[in-house]
């Protein structure tokens, strides 16, 4: 199974933000130690070219991004210090999600150990997100003739506001976001379908709402590809979330999504999106169980170590 990542690219952060990057390093180490993949099997693609990025992001914004010509307010909005390295990683992240989509079409499912930077708008960065990797990938998959219809299924605790705004009134890309109502972003955009959940929503209620939402989407929209943002920040002990799912409940969410599209033989490209548990190893474990679930749905799973 194809697994992509961008962990080779490090960048400076504010001194209290190490948890934002270290979870990826720990996850890669855990995957290798478990025997699920060898280091050389975790693939890092070349950075996405700017011509690809400007299919989604405005040329003016991309030029400012390239040269670090951003206002103090723009830096505050994204919450990260600009550096050439962080933009390089954002470009690699976009490329990794696109490669994940391409391989999902070939093999049924593929995985990116990152991505899901859904707060980036066409003309600005926001909420730890410089470039909207899922939007870039979805547009490229259609523009390049791989598919005609894409569902972006966003199960991060935060609404995919940038994604919703980018694809507003686009009939070929359906945006479905199931998220907490009373958390960031405090101004929500309109996705094609939004399900807003109350504080402390537990496993059973979340799974019921998700299944109901999927039923509603698939009544009228038949995707040829699903980009699934498998956020870990719906976990009860997440520092930036306000829902109350258990680790087991998040595993059931992954099973529900993957099984739903396995039945219809719809390819699924999985990105990991957010996850900020107070104890970082819990986030790593949640992401790791998503990796295991994805492998179980791969056609060659009998030849993969589990």
Image: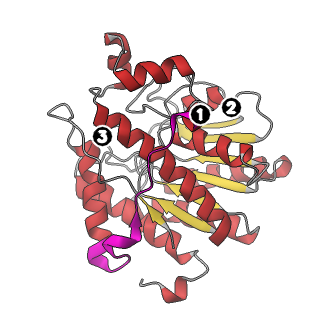
Measured as percent of width and height from the top left, residue 276 is found at 31, 45
Q: Pick the residue in front: 50 or 58.
A: 50
Where 255 falls versus 237 (above or below)?
A: below
Name the residue: 60% across, 39% down. 135
Q: Is residue 177 left or right of residue 36?
A: right
Dot placed on the residue nearer the N-terminal end, 2 or 3: 2
Mark 2 and mark 3 residues within 8 Å of each other at the beta carbon: no
Check disc 3: other Cα within 10 Å, few if <14, some if 14-19, many if 20+: few
Residue at label 1?
A: 163
Q: In whole angstroms, how far apart are the C-alphas of marks 1 and 3?
A: 23 Å
Residue at label 2?
A: 167
Q: Give the range drawn in magenta.
A: 32-51
Name the residue: 44% across, 67% down. 291
Q: Pick the residue in front: 60 or 252.
A: 60
Q: Can residue 134 be seen in this view?
A: yes
Total marks placed: 3
Residue 239's label in the rendered image is 3
Q: Is 47 a magenta residue? A: yes
Q: Can residue 257 be seen in this view?
A: no
- Viewer-nearest of discs 2 and 3: 2
Where 287 falls versus 166 (above or below)?
A: below
Q: In whole angstroms, how far apart are the C-alphas of marks 2 and 1?
A: 6 Å
Mark 1 and mark 3 residues within 8 Å of each other at the beta carbon: no
Name the residue: 53% across, 39% down. 179
Q: Is residue 147 left or right of residue 56?
A: right
Name the residue: 29% across, 28% down. 80
Q: Is residue 57 left or right of residue 224?
A: left
Measured as percent of width and height from the top left, residue 103 is found at 60, 64
Q: Is 71 a magenta residue? A: no
Measured as percent of width and height from the top left, residue 146 is found at 73, 54
Residue at far right of view: 220
- Viewer-nearest of discs 1 and 3: 1
């Amino acid at each position: 199974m194809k697994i992509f990542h961008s962990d080779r690219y490090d960048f400076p952060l504010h001194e209290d933000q190490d948890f934002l990057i270290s979870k990826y390093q720990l996850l890669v180490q855990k995957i290798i130690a478990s025997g699920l993949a060898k280091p050389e099997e975790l693939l890092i693609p070349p950075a996405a070219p700017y011509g690809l990025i400007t299919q989604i992001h405005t040329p003016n914004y991309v030029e400012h991004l390239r040269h670090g010509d951003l206002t103090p307010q723009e830096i505050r909005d994204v919450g990260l210090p600009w550096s050439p390295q962080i933009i390089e990683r954002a470009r690699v992240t976009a490329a990794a999600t696109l490669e994940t989509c391409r391989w999902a079409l070939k093999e049924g499912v593929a995985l990116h150990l990152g991505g899901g930077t859904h707060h980036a708008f066409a003309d600005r960065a926001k909420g730890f997100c410089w470039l909207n990797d899922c939007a870039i990938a979805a547009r490229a998959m259609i523009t390049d003739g791989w598919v005609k219809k894409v569902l972006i299924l966003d199960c991060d605790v935060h609404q995919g506001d940038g994604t919703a705004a980018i694809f507003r009134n686009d009939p070929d890309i359906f945006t479905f976001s199931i998220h907490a109502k009373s958390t960031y972003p405090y101004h929500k955009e309109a996705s094609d379908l939004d399900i807003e959940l109350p504080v402390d929503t537990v496993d059973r209620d979340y799974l019921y709402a998700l299944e109901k939402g999927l039923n509603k989407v698939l009544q009228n929209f038949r995707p040829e590809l699903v980009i699934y943002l498998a956020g870990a920040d719906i976990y009860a002990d997440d520092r930036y979330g306000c829902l109350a799912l258990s680790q087991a409940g998040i595993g059931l969410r992954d099973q529900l999504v993957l099984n739903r599209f396995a039945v219809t033989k719809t390819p699924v490209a999985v990105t990991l999106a957010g996850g900020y548990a107070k104890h970082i190893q819990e986030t790593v474990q949640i992401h790791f169980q998503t990796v295991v679930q994805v492998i179980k749905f791969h056609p060659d799973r009998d030849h993969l170590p589990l």
